[in-house]
Image (tube, helix red, strand yellow):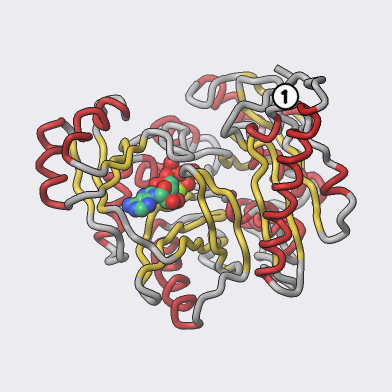
Amino acid sequence: MSSLLPGATLGIIGGGQLARMMIFEARRMGYRVCVLTPDRHAPAVALADRWIPGRIDELEAGNQLAREVDVITLDTEHVPASMLAELERIRPVRPSSSVLRTIQDRRAQRRFLDIINAPQPRCLPVDTLAELREAAASLGFPCVLKSRRSGYDGKGQAVIAAAHQLEASWAAIGARPAMLEEFVEFDAEISVLLARNPRGEMRFYPVARNVHRNHVLHTTVAPAPISNAVEAEAFEIAARIANALDHVGMMAVEMFLVGGSTVLVNEIAPRPHNSGHYTFGACVTSQFEQHIRAVFDLPLGDPSLPRPAAMVNLLGDLWHNGEPDWTQVLARAEARLHLYGKAHPRPGRKMGHVLVLDEDPLLALDASEELIARLEASGARRSVGGEQISCHG
Ligand SMILES: Nc1ncnc2c1ncn2[C@@H]1O[C@H](COP(=O)(O)OP(=O)(O)OP(=O)(O)O)[C@@H](O)[C@H]1O
Ligand SMILES: [Mg+2]
C-alpha cells in the first residue's frame, strides 16, 4: 500500500479518548473517520463522521467497518488478535494482528522481550496457586501478580507483601493465568514514545517521566530529568522492540529506571499513550497526528518539544461534589484543559487532563499539581455550603 492522502477514511476500533483525540487531528488534516464502538455516548462518537454500533470483539461489525474504510487502527489493545487477522484480509490493520498477539498476553510479551534481549524485571508464569507459591519462593517478597490478559490501570494486579497474602491475591485477580514479577524499587518511571511508519522510519519524542497513584498515571513531565546515556539506552531498547515487531503507528514503552542508570521494560503499548498526551499542545506534531501519519504511510512529523510540559490526569474522583470549578484552569494562560466528554465520572475513570507549559519542566509539574489541588478544593468548598451539586450519573 502506498500513502493514503487526505480524503481517505480511517477506521478506529474502540471509541475512547484516544480515538477522540485521533479524530481531532485526522479531521483537521482532511481525513474521514468511522468508529466502531457499542456505546453511542463514547467520547469518539460525537466527533466521528460515521459510527458503527458493535462490540470491539464482534467480527461482523468489524467486517462492516473494514468494508467502509481504507485502513483500520485501534483505540485499545484489547481487540482480539484473531478478529484482526480476519480483518487484515480486507484492509490493512495497523498495528497488525501479529503485534497484538504478542502484546495482549503478558507472558507472550515477556517472552518476546527475552528473545530480543530487552532488560526486564525477573518474572515467572503462574497458572495455579501451587505455581504461584513456587514462583514467590523463587522471586521473594514483595512481588506483583498480574493477570496475563485484559489488564489496564492496574486492574487484574495485586502487590503481594508476604506469603500469607498469596491465596487472597490469587483470588483477587480471579484465579486466572498470570505472571508474577519481582517488585522493582525504581527511582522513576519513564516512557519512550515513538512512531514508526510502514517504511520503517521512526521518530522519538522526548522521554517522559511518569508518576502513578494507585497504579493509575497521575502526572507526566517532559523532558524527563535523565542523563543522555540513559536516554540513548531507552531509545535503543524501544527502537529494537518496534523494529522486531515491525510495528506501525505510535508505540509507548513503559520503563523503570533503577539505580540511576539501568532501565527495565515494564510493558509495551502499541498505540498513542496517556503519557504522550502532553504532546497534544506541547509538541510540533502530537502523538495523535503522528499515529495518523504512520498508519496512512505518510512521512512522519517533527516530534520536537519547543517548551517543557507537564500533564496531570483528571480522574472521576474529582467530581465527588459535582462539576469541578474549571475557571481555576481556564484563568491560567499557561494551562490547557482537555475534557473527554464522558457523562459518568466514576472514581478512577480518566475524564480529562490538564497540560501546563513552562520554561522549566519542574515548575510546569509543580503548577499542574497546584491546579489539581485547587480543583479538588473547589469541589470541597462547594460541599461546605451544604448544597451538593449532583454528579451527572
Ligand atoms: N514489577 C513492578 N514493580 C513495581 N511497581 C510496579 C511493577 N509492575 C507495575 N508496577 C506499578 O504499577 C503500575 C501499573 O502497572 P502496569 O503498567 O503493569 O499495569 P497496567 O494495568 O497494564 O497499566 P496501564 O496499561 O494502565 O499502563 C506501573 O506503572 C507501576 O507504577
Ligand atoms: Mg502500564
Regarding residue 265, the answer to whether it shows in the image is yes
On the image, the x and y values in percent for residue 92 come to 54, 43
On the image, the x and y values in percent for residue 339 come to 75, 39
Task: Tell me which corner region of the image, top left, top right, bottom left or bottom right, holds residue 350.
Answer: top right
- How many marks the image carries: the answer is 1
Left or right: 333 in relation to 321: right
Quadrant holding the C terminus: top right
Amino acid type of disc 1? Ala
Left or right: 216 in relation to 186: right
Residue at the image position 32 percent from the left and 58 percent from the top:
184
Q: Nearer the viewer, residue 361 or 246?
A: 361
Does the residue tagged 1 have its C-beta within 8 Å of any atom of ligand 1? no
On the image, the x and y values in percent for residue 63 come to 55, 26
The residue most toward the bottom is 228
Q: Nearer the viewer, residue 252 or 312?
A: 312
Q: Nearer the viewer, residue 112 or 71?
A: 112
Mark 1 surroundings within 10 Å by alpha-carbon count, few (fewer than 14), some (14 through 19), many (20 or more):
few
Q: Nearer the viewer, residue 273 or 115?
A: 273
On the image, the x and y values in percent for residue 29 come to 80, 51
Residue 280, placed above or below residue 69: below
Which residue has dot 1 on it? 343
Regarding residue 99, the answer to whether it shows in the image is no
Residue 287, placed above or below residue 238: above
Task: Tell me which corner region of the image, top left, top right, bottom left or bottom right, holds residue 365.
Answer: bottom right
Residue at the image position 68 percent from the left and 59 percent from the top:
279
Secondary structure under tag 1 reads loop
Residue at the image position 62 percent from the left and 67 percent from the top:
222
Residue 184, placed above or below residue 316: below
